[in-house]
Image (cartoon, rainbow, N blue to C red):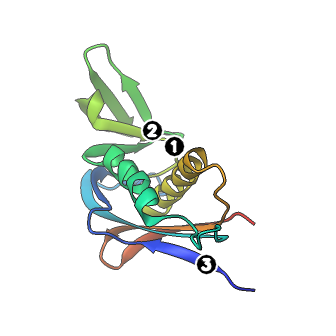
Amino acid sequence: MPRWSIALEKEYLKFSCAHFLIFPDGRKERLHGHNYRVRCEIAGELDEHGLVIDFIEVKPVVKQLCDELDEHWLLPGLHPALRVVPRDDGHTEVHYGSARYLAPSDEILVLPIANTSAELLAAWFGRTLLARLRARFGALRVQRLRVRIAETDGQDGIYESDER
């Protein structure tokens, strides 16, 4: 049975963020950043024009997601030991173990993930992308979505969703 997909890998599909990983033994990395690169593959049925989805229409959706993440500190909102406390002065306190941080609230993004690993970032990105594609292109029949988030060359987190 034939299958079709499109793949997106553009220089501008990227975002720069700060984060730290929390390890199973309770240790955490130091706060640091990455210049993440995003690669997507969307598989689906061809429409009457012979397209899975038009590149011109899907690229802005992926770019918008990258722009929303860009230049933020990413925090895992579902981690049970991490506390994120917004303050009335426009700042947010972040508590993990003995570490305490204070940052402007508008520079922090709390994502509904348990850790800020490349794998979970790829999963969040992929699920969010799929929801936005469906909202924008209701008739789109995605059969498979694959998202790669690269922290650096040779280190990618990969999320794949089989929608069949």
Asked if residue 2 shows in the view, the reply is yes
Q: Which residue is mark 2?
A: 82
Q: What amino acid does circle 3 point to?
A: Trp
Q: Position of residue 91 (x, y in %)?
A: 26, 24
Q: Quadrant of residue 68?
A: top left
Q: What amino acid does circle 2 point to?
A: Leu
Q: Residue at x 66, y 54 (%)?
A: 139
Which of the image's four quarters has the N terminus? bottom right
Q: Position of residue 140 (x, y in %)?
A: 63, 57
Is residue 23 left or right of 47 when viewed as pictured?
A: left
Q: Nearer the viewer, residue 46 or 125?
A: 46
Q: Which residue is mark 1?
A: 79
Q: Residues within 10 Å of mark 1 (few under 14, many from 20)?
A: some
Residue at disc 2, secondary structure: loop
Q: Which residue is mark 3?
A: 4
Q: Earlier in the sequence, mark 3 or mark 1?
A: 3
Tell me if residue 5 comes above or below residue 14 in the rendering. Answer: below
Q: Nearer the viewer, residue 13 or 37?
A: 13
Q: Position of residue 82 (x, y in %)?
A: 45, 38
Asked if residue 117 shows in the view, the reply is no
Q: Position of residue 37 (x, y in %)?
A: 33, 66
Marks 1/2 in contact by CB < 8 Å: the verdict is yes
Give the numbered dot on residue 40.
none
